[in-house]
Image: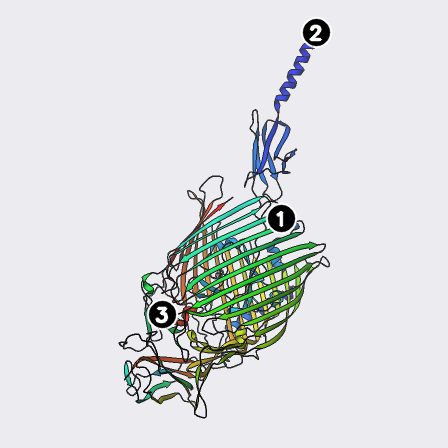
Amino acid sequence: MKSTFKNFYFLAIILLIAACSSDDSTEIDEEKPTISVNYTSGFPQGCALLSRGETYNFRAMVTDNSELAAYSIDIHHNFDHHTHDDQVTECDLGEIQSPVNPLIYVENFTIEGSLTSYEINIPVTIPTDIDAGDYHCAYSVTDATGWQSRTSIDIKIVE
Amino acid sequence: MLQKILGIWLFFSLCTTAFAQDSFQIKGIVQHAKDFTPAQGATIIGNNLYAVSSETGAFSINNVREGTYSFTVSHIGCEPITIIVEVEQNMEEVKVFLIESATVLEEVKVNGKTKKREALEVPIITQTVSKEFLEQNRENTLMQTLSKIAGVSTINIGSGQSKPVIRGLGFNRVAMVQNGIKHEAQQWGNDHGLEIDQHGIENIQIIKGPASLLYGSDAIAGVVDIQPNQTPLPNSFGGEVNILGESNNDLLGVSAGVTSRKDKWFYRGRLTYRDYGDYKVPADRINYENYVFELDDNDLRNTAGNEADASLGIGYVTEGFKSETVFSNVNAKNGFFANAHGLEVRTSSIDYDSSNRDVDLPYHKVNHFKITNNTSISAGEHLLHIDLGYQNNNREEHSEPVPHGYMPTPPDTKERLFIKNTYSLNFRDDFNPTDKHDMVVGLNTEYQNNNIGGWGFLIPEYNRFTAGIFAYDQFEINSNFHVLGGLRYDVGRVDTKAYYDWYPSTVNNADGSTSYIHYQRSKDKTLDFGSLSASLGLSYIQDKTSYKINVGRSFRMPLANELASDGVNYHMYRYERGNLDLDPEVSYQLDLSVEHTENSFSVGVSPFVNIFQNYIYLNPTSSYYETIQIYEYTEAEVFRIGGEFNASATITKNLQLDASLEYVYSEQTSGPKEGFTLPFSPPLSGLLSARYQFEKILIFNKPQLIADYRITAAQEEIVPPEEKTDGYQVLNMSFLTEIDVFKNSLPLEMRVKLNNVFDTKYFNHTSFYRLIDVPEAGRNISLSLTIPFQ
């Protein structure tokens, strides 16, 4: 019987040693991608005014330590002031208004070729029949691991 | 002659008188101290003197000479008491008051085995939590109280709610059992707490390991089993009122309970009410990504809430039969942090800062109604147990209606509604085929019916039926060596219901046309599952050391959301996609436990190794659905290793030191997140406690000072979308005492507790608000007063 329980101790020690020695044979990616419009040609900048009927190139820089995978652009109204952006500047919001025919721009794109840096450049035409007012432009980007970064910008669509 | 005769007669008669004067009668009465009812049949035993009390409790002992005598008075169900009687002339009636033995169950000790010994013999590694522990360590929620136990932690949602986590696994991987019935609510939910009144619980058994054999699906990581309360003694009445106040969230709580038993019928009831304001964190602002939320007076905006609970139990006990039915209702309302709901940053026109006690949007409210019946029948060699349960869980989540993607502004605030009915029937037969064997065979069945409502879709409606049969045998090789082996088979059927969006989405077709579609989010599907569970364990007791080893296979049936969800969770910014091909989760675990106890110290270690064949989790992919990141329910092989260490030493008669350590390492060994850990992995953590018992000071009886120092390491092991969390050290102090207010009545119990003494700003890796960088609660002073009555 004694020897059986010596084995228990032995097993317990093995367990503890195994627990403490983590062999990181698999390299894991712990870094999120980054996203920014804070450079000269980044668009839109905080509080930007966009005119109906115009076409704008939406541009943002995205980077990752290993492999960029996909990004999205989401333009939606902020007529109810439900949220604010994460940019440094604070914009003057218009009156709270009810949406009649707001612009909804919801698009996803993939980034091919295992890139570690990429400039998003998507032309968007603002339709002439949509509601003017406060809007949000939200960018997001993922890497191949599944990490995501987002940024959100307050903009205004004018006549 | 006559004179002589007279003289002799007188002499003798005088003598007789003198002798008679020398021998007295002791008269007395034996009563129960509690209610002054007579104690019939009490034995009063002294040196060569003996009496038994009558129906009125009276007794008498004749022919006792003058002097001092000692008697022992004993009665069934009472503590034996020794009395000293001065026998002399004109002595008064002796009054004896008997105090009940602590519990009915302690009478079982007569058979030679204490509960403690039984626990040592069972090869399943369990931990028992007593009422005393719960009262001394009571925190805001039951799980926060239990998290002092190594290997048990919580996922907290603010100050008023928390979910159980055992060795790093939580949600539906821990079975919560109350009165033999599995507690069924919306356990899968991120911001869902446990709907159980933490007052009035006498005994909890925790299994830190797979326990499907005994509890079926969901007990894959462990069980928190709240045992039925003990049957009160005949002709007893008792109760207590507990009042609690806290400074951090301005909490006021009252809980009152009574128990009563005449002869065969017994009753118990409890009412609990708690109301609290926003809780304070040691920070003026929260920095989450690029957002900054200024806090008003350190209040975590809109985290106030309240809770009202009631329960009533009615029982009948007689020779060989016992049955108790308990009705309970838990009703709670909690606000969620207003600046960010989940990960979604929000601004609002609601004036949250006008009061720290109101609950504005977003909030949830839940009502959990439960009826349980536990019946035990002893039929010859067999002890039959039948547990019946009905539960109705009604949970609503409200938030300000906001348009998202193609969803227009919803008509009201009711974002989600879940109504779940659960019916349970458990049966087991406990018998001893021989002296050496203790066999149990049983059946568990459960039917769930889940309904949904509101404008936000997360999980489909479903019906689910599960049934399992099991048998296990505890075999005594010798009095110190026990083996337990068991097998179980479960079948289950999940019926998911179809769901379509209530609004149309815009779809640009390949031919250039545009259509407007009400997307289907879940399908009508019937899925069948079956799974085997098994367990084999040994326990060996060698003097002061006990050893246990257990190997087991456990399972968990996939949930309806894991199978069939298909929609956007806007608060978490993710599109959740289920997978109809998921198999029941299967886990194998090897557990060890060694405990050594000496008079002045004890040490214990309980390591484990665990392999999941297919751990189901929500994996963030790199793809998008309408600009929302797609998360998919995925299976992966997982390897886990870890354990707990406990040590306790009595330094002097008054000073006791305790230390514990807990650690889990998890790694996904296959699948898209190979090499990563599991979500919500608790970091390495240790707890040092010192307890000093003072002598009686004035009216303070048994005053104790306790210091708990928690040291937690940083959590560097993360999986998307988690953040690494720094380590921290937090000191909690408490002072416990009994107060003798009135003579001859039970003492008041008082507790003053100071949590987070230095108002340390730290983050808990497994807290719901961790994702938005909200620190844990700041300094809190709580005062608890318990007033017992009889």
| Residue B719 coordinates in the image, percent (x, y) | 46, 76
Q: Secondary structure at mark 2?
A: helix
Q: Residue furthest bottom?
A: B511
Residue B2's label in the rendered image is 2
Q: Are marks 3 and 1 in contact (CB under 8 Å)?
A: no
Q: Secondary structure at mark 1?
A: helix
| Amino acid type at image mark 3 | Asn
Report the Cα–Cα distance between label 2 and label 3: 118 Å
Residue identifier under label 1: B107
Q: Chain of mark 3?
A: B
Circle 1: is it few (<14), some (14-19), or many (20+) Cα within 10 Å? some
Mark 3 vs mark 1: in front: 3
- Position of B174 relative to B28 (above/below): below
Q: Quadrant of residue B377?
A: bottom right
Residue A122 image position (x, y, % from top left): 36, 89
Question: In the image, are marks 2 and 3 on the same chain?
Answer: yes
Whichever of labels 2 and 3 marks the residue nearer the N terminus, that label is 2
Q: Marks 3/1: CA distance?
A: 57 Å
CA gap between label 2 and label 1 equals: 69 Å
Identify the residue under disc 3.
B339
Observer-nearest of B383 and B45: B383
- When asked about the image quadrant of residue B470, the answer is bottom right
Q: Is residue B48 above or below residue A125?
A: above
